[in-house]
Image (cartoon, rainbow, N blue to C red):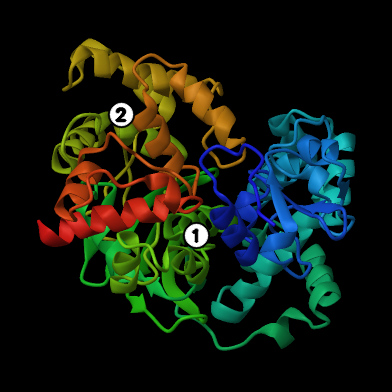
Amino acid sequence: MTTTTAGIPGLDTESCYAAVKSRDRRFDGVFYIAVRTTGIYCRPSCPARTPALHNVTFHRSAAAAQAAGYRACKRCLPDATPGSPDWDAAATVAGRAMRLIADGVVDREGVDGLAQRLGYTSRHLSRVLTAELGAGPLALARAQRAQTARVLVETTDLSFADIAFASGFASIRQFNDTVREVYAATPTQLRGRRGGARTPGAIELRLAVRTPFAGSDLLRYLAVRAVEGVEVAGDGWYARTLDLPHGPGTVRIELGDVLDPGQTALVPARFVLHDLRDTSAAVARVRRLLDGDCDPIAVADHFTGDPLIGPLVRRRPGLRVPGHVSGDEIAVRAVLGQQVSVAGARTVAGRLVAAHGRPFITDIPGLTHLFPDAPTVAALDPEQLPMPRARGRALTGLAAALAGGDVALDRGPDRDAVRRALLALPGIGPWTADYIALRALGHPDIHLPTDVGVRNALTALGAPGADPSTWAPWRSYALLHLWTSLEENS
């Protein structure tokens, strides 16, 4: 019996099935898997045992699966995944909500602020999250606070009062009560070895990532593109300034290769924050930079047997797609990089920082400024910018859309909706919109067919006519392997 993808453009049966085997939540809502033997359809990340390939079909929407006669799985609630056209597409809302909760939105703006960002009432949002995740927004935010508190208790020498403040608790009593309830231990009992934080506001953590982890390649990518004043890199480390909700900060991470597969690597990170309430936001944003939730084994398995990308993956296991700590910043830098070299884009960005960035005193040599925020860039005169006038207008227009909230790049909105909003802006074409999706939104399935580096890499590998559709749903990783192979041979 043959399998079909029910008209899913860009995704074939094998690539869909690979995503199902890896249970990667990033593909929830991109497609649905239906099982003939049970008459049930599920999301790709359903925890149930993976059905045999010959028993399944794939569908673009929950409605399509229902029309084909399948009923929703009660275990994974596929009707509520991203991409559902139904009103209560709860996973679209739940996924956006969880990303915003991890960034500390509930702590900063409350449940009403979270609901407003998502376009729902607080009551409906609570119903959606409870149905999808088994807990409402307050409970989910409380769990996030507890997790942050535990990490700080066990890995730093901050006082418990500072930890309570940094974790988002309203009082020390609330902090103590929550820790005891969640972990059945007092903060004193949880306290393990003390970290070395001596600078006020300094926090030293270890960020977990799956292995293999090609940290040296990630470092090389970031170092080549480092903008003067905002980023700096050295032998085995990278550092940058952070523009956080309550104030500025810096982070310094140590990046090396950990190639033992199937394990957990710990990336040392030292944060210095003006306001400790930004701890959760800073950690979440740096994890995005590291592509910390990637499953490299699932990615590698997909490319096994591919004559072009397969050898590149084996040569560099664990290669990551570099994210970014600020969607607004990388969007501005994407426009600066239109039709210029990496070095040229870096130079123009450095001039923009020197002229319009906010000066910031740090304890890391070379870090002197915060990158100009969207309102600052939007207020610039396009005629005075060191670039063609059309690009200058595109830059300030994009910044105005970001500053006005017409485009949000905090990984909360639906990716397709963000792409449409970007393409609607003058001067923003498919390359720019997709590059932003790659770096700002963490999209795992981006291909840049017009990119000069991609074309040169394919030519150097002797495959200028390669079909990128066979690399879905991991085309972003294929893209990074192509770029890396070109840099290696240049």
Residue 10 higher or lower than 426, as above or below: below
**Position in image of residue 169 (x %, y %):** 73, 58
Q: What residue type is labelled 1?
A: Arg
Position of 377 compared to 486: left or right? right
Amino acid found under the numbered disc labelled 2:
Val
Residue at image location 76% in from the left, 35% down from the top: 115
- Please provide percent x and percent y for residue 281: 56, 52
The residue labelled by disc 2 is 335
Is disc 2 placed on a helix, strand or loop? helix
Local packing at callout 1 (Cα closer than 10 Å; few below 14, some 14-19, many 20+) is: some
CB under 8 Å between discs 1 and 2: no
| Tag shown at residue 287 | 1
**Residue 304, located in which quarter of the rendered image?**
bottom left
Sequence-wise, the earlier of marks 1 and 2 is 1
Whether residue 222 is visible to the viewer of this picture, yes or no, is: no
Image coordinates of residue 392 in percent, x first then y, are 26, 18
Q: Give the left or right position of residue 166, taking residue 465 as reference.
A: right
In terms of depth relative to the viewer, which is nearer, 344 or 52? 52
Residue 160, placed above or below residue 73: below
Residue 447, quarter of picture: top left
